[in-house]
Image (spheres, grey):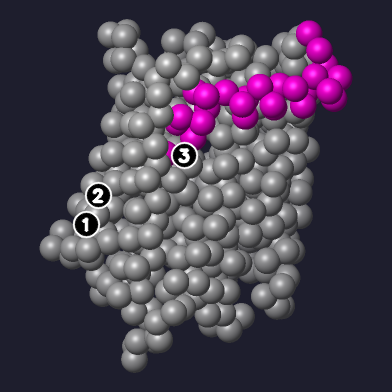
Amino acid sequence: MIALRVFVPFALGYFLSYLYRVVNAVIAPDLVRDAGLDANDLGLLTSAYFLTFAAFQLPLGVLLDRFGPRRTEAVLLLFAAAGAVVFATADSATGLVVGRALIGFGVSACLMAAFKAFVTWFPSRRLPLVNGLQMASGGLGALAATAPVEALMHVTDWRGLFMSLGVLTLAVAAILFVVVPEKRAESSDAGPGTGLRDQVAGIVTVFTSPLFWRIAPLTVASQASFLSIQGLWSGPWLRDVAGLDRGGVADTLLLVAAAMVAGFILLGALAERVGRWGLSPLAVGVGGMTAFMVVQVLTTLQWTGAVVPLWLLFGFFGTTGIIPYAGLSQRFPPQLAGRVNTGLNLLVFVAAFAGQWGIGAIIDLWPETTAGGYAPPAYQAAFGTMLGIQVLGLAWYGLFRRGREATA
């Protein structure tokens, strides 16, 4: 019963977080039409979520270790609700960016707070599986943001959608605050030293760890590519390269989200099982991220012989970048768990912001097609750039001297 009181509220928060993150992939045509956006504007607008999300990660790590995940996430979700209202009522691109930025700030704790709570309440051997189930709840949010949202567009518009999301966000904040239990020591979870200097020292410990910097470049590059493409540019690609209509795009994205859910659950369970055989979660994550790169070769080459299976693989293997979070948190002292995860998340979401906006900037270098879409060669250049960065991250991981992996 305690496990459910911990898991379910945080899962609801991450469901909303992911729904907010990817919904623009479906409503992008409406935003472009109503606000007069080009590809660069659309990329900036959508990626504003990632920028504020990333900017708060280091302070978030301190707050999680100092005040606990329950209170931290519940308060931040109030800002997300406010952002949804601002987005719904905005009458300019600037207002949309502000609303989107507030949403990103407000949901910035939804994953990291859950990871912190799970470290507190679950045994370490269960963390890869529990973290995978948490990620699966995000996948359900991504699923809800596809065909269900497209169906809602026949009942309301994107403004009504975001007003409803604001109300739901307030409800989840209340559930978190009331339902989640709190261990007596949770509010002072930062360890023996709880002053600001000690908190900053913990951040320094994380960011000067050779182990952290061995895995960070590859994880960051992989997650940035997955988040930036799946959260926005997958929809336009399916329209402009694969030639799907709006309903077909939404249906395909729904299947991609379902593949995400399967990936989070199955790969999390796999990481837990092989851990019993002595294979670390980091090794599983690297193998999965390599497979993800292979899939991206096909999307970059614009292979349309089997569009749906290709994007199912994209959704499934794109989830593997989350596995190193559990592996890293287990290699550091428990009191640093919040700062380890948020430190990695900071880099991931800064890169996702740059990637999502950068893809739009690259696409804008080509003129629009006669049908009003974006040029297929533009996607090839943009996706190829993201893939190249991941290859460099894999090379760094392989070349980094293993003897330097020991943490401080």
Q: Quadrant of the N terminus?
A: top right
Q: Quadrant of the C terminus?
A: top right
**SS class, disc 2:** helix
Q: Whole-percent x and y of residue 277?
A: 28, 8
Element type where label 1 sits in the image = helix
> In the rendered structure, which disc, 1 or 3, sits on the residue that comes first in sequence?
3
- The x, y position of residue 111, in whole percent, is 58, 35
Q: Which residue is mark 2?
A: 295
Could one spot residue 344 in this view of the protein? yes
- Which residue sits furthest left? 305
Which stretch appears magenta?
Answer: 192-218
**C-alpha distance separating marks 3 and 2:** 19 Å
- The answer to whether the residues at label 1 and label 2 have Cβ atoms under 8 Å apart is yes
Real-space Cα distance between discs 1 and 3? 22 Å
Q: Is 208 covered by the magenta stretch?
A: yes
Query: 340 or 261, which lies in front?
Result: 340
Question: Label 1 is placed on what type of residue?
Answer: Leu
Provide residue 369's location: percent of width, then percent of height: 35, 87
Say above or below: 163 vs 170.
below
